[in-house]
Image: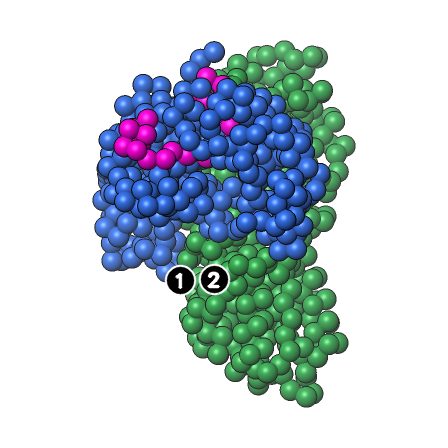
Chain colours: A green, B blue
Amino acid sequence: MKEIGHASFNRRLAINVGGGFVPGMNAVVMGAALSAGRLGWEIVGIRDGFDGLLYPDRYPDGGLVTLDPRWVENLDPAARGILGQSPRVDPFHVRKVNEDNMVEEVDLSDQIIEMLKADGIDGLISVVSGRGLSILYKLHRKGLNAVCIPRSVENDIVGTMVSFGFNSALSFAIEMLSRARQAAQSAHRIGVVEVQGEQAGWLALQAGIAVCADAVLIPEIPCDLDTVAARLKDKVTPRRPWGLVVVAEGAQFVDKPQVQSDKPSANSLKDSLSPLASGDASGHVIQRSGRTAETVANRLQLLTAEETYPLVLGSWVRGGPPTAVDRQLGLGYGAGAVQALKAGKNGVMVAFQQPPNIAFVPLAEAINKVRTVPADSEFMQIAKSLGICLGREL
Amino acid sequence: MKDQSINPSAPTGTVLNIQRYCSHDGPGIRTTVFLKGCSLRCKWCSNPESIRPKPELAYDPKLCTGKKECGLCLKSPFPEGAFYVVDGADDKIRVNWDLATDCDEATVSLCPTDALYMFGKEMTVEEVLTEVEKDASFYRNTGGGMTISGGEVMLQPDFAAACLQEAHNCGFNTAIETAGNVPWSFMEKVLPHVDTMLHDLKLMNSERHKKWTGVGNERILENFKKAYETFPDIDFIARTPLIPGVNEDEEHIRAVLEFIRPHKNVIDYELLPYHRFGTGKYEFLGMVYELSDFTTPSDESVHRLQAIIDEAFGRSKKD
């Protein structure tokens, strides 16, 4: 048993957060720290991904933060994460300037594992996105005891019903769609609002249902804009001279409408905050972030002769306070990760398969998959029952 | 100092591409040899495939016929977990770029549609020159020749020097494009074989240079100054990739002019207005385009800044 200060610990863990902001990260840290404290374990937070470990000199208070339960329980779970994040969290490709002043990417994965060992840390809890799962899986294969907590505003990580951050993004999207709907009603136009969802349409579908949108276009159902236009022509009448279409950024089209290629996106902020979602090379991941709304709006205006306007929520959904659901999830996920390590599990992702039941999914089963909306999803059925057009006659 | 050059013994070099009929990389009609490896990380880079020093996997989903028709890459000898398919609208292959790092050229070549391919290959000096010699008649008629570009040409100094020397032996004009962020010893090897050196002066303020490219510019400026002085017979052409919000300002242009003014062998200063053509390539490589919000400079802005350069070079307008 190790003595640190006046306390004694029989195990030492670390926790860090991968790139990509979602609100309420402190809840996860609190959940892990309080749960570890109950077991008499010490837990330290690594600042800014792995940077606190690799570059401790950058931090006047040290790159590792001891998460004493007596201090942690005073944190606000809704506040911005105390550990921070690094935009790039990949120890296999760490960018650095070498002794010859040349920029290069080097593999520091072995060094990180050794540093953790040297610090007496025998388990790492990482709050990561889908790509982060692959990186932690690689580290796990090299011998690191890793437990991941899924984080995604698109809820596209398989193995869990809900990823941390999704519910907050959903709530914000619903609020914004309500405003877009009011604007459409006021202006007698058709609003086309793009929300996040490169490969999975959960955010668009659930938010679209919540505001009773006229149509919801998601990547899982390649849509026929002629069908959408026909439905809008039926619904947009002199008595109801407005419409609302929700489109996921990765929406697919049967007739491949010409997406703008050479001019800046409708919402350039979106591109800058979500760079992976840009570009013109990918035929299946995403056509054009921030431009899908513009493309759909232009096309529908042509087909319906009704005025349309595009809006892009983009990365705005990542900000703001966490919802009650995400606060609970964060605490639960944090505590669950410690329970995994207590149960001798590592190389796993904590999952809520039937909340509040926590499960531990092997990382190998969580990577290389995308949690898409199945055709027989209850949400699909609800949307159809409400008369929401899903882009095609189903 | 340890030797940081990629191919110190120079029997071969890592070549990204050889492009024929180029007209903007030096005088006349030229063949441009692009080498892999770069020592800067410019956030607007439109050639991400040239950054890493070694050959690397790339994937063009448009060429993939999908799991049902093919699916070869989902089995051995392709690395486990490197490729996968998502349930949904199509059955095209996705690449797990974190697990596909062990894919070698032999394995990648098994892809029947070339959706998977490698950026970059090892070539000998002879192989490069065989390709370059195909357009020898154009060079003779136009004063053109071979240009070596990158990436950063100076990161393979022995290979580059050998190629340039061989081109000279064939009677071809030689040129290089460089950003100059290498030890002087690398430049010293290459420059004796160069007729024209096109060199970037991206930002004259070192702090800003570091912000946008990853390193300060002190050594770059020192290298260029030394090159102007040590190799008076080379025609030097300064260049600035013009990026709105980064260096599209008079202050930068005037600072460059001030820097090159004392050196009569700097025969021109060119502006290269930023374009977005390269952004899609990042997805071919599974790389993140760090800041895709750059816009292209306006014609008005380019003309205004060009007028300052023309005035400095005693031209009434750009010829």
**Tag on residue B89?**
1
Chain to which mark 1 belongs: B
Vertical placement of residue A201 versus B127, above or below:
below
Please identify the quarter of the rendering in which residue A314 is found. bottom right
Q: Dot 1 surroundings within 10 Å: few (below 14), some, or many (20 or more)?
A: few
> Could one spot residue A305 in this view of the protein?
yes
- Percent coordinates x, y for residue B244 in the rendering: 64, 47
Q: Residue at x 48, y 23 (%)?
A: B231
Tell me whether the residue at label 1 lies in contact with that at label 2, contact meaning CB atoms closer than 8 angstroms.
yes
Q: Residue at x 74, y 27 (%)?
A: A71
Report the label total. Answer: 2
Chain to which mark 2 belongs: A
Which residue is at the front of the view, B40 or B117?
A: B40
Same chain assignment for discs 1 and 2: no
Magenta segment: B165-187
- Percent coordinates x, y for residue A180 in the rendering: 69, 68
> Could one spot residue A368 in this view of the protein?
no
Side of A356 where B146 appears, left or right: left
Residue that badge 2 annotates: A219
- Percent coordinates x, y for residue B201 in the rendering: 58, 34
Which residue is at the front of the view, B199 or A39?
A: B199
- SS at mark 1 in the image: loop
Q: Residue at x 48, y 51 (%)?
A: B277
Badge 2 amino acid = Pro
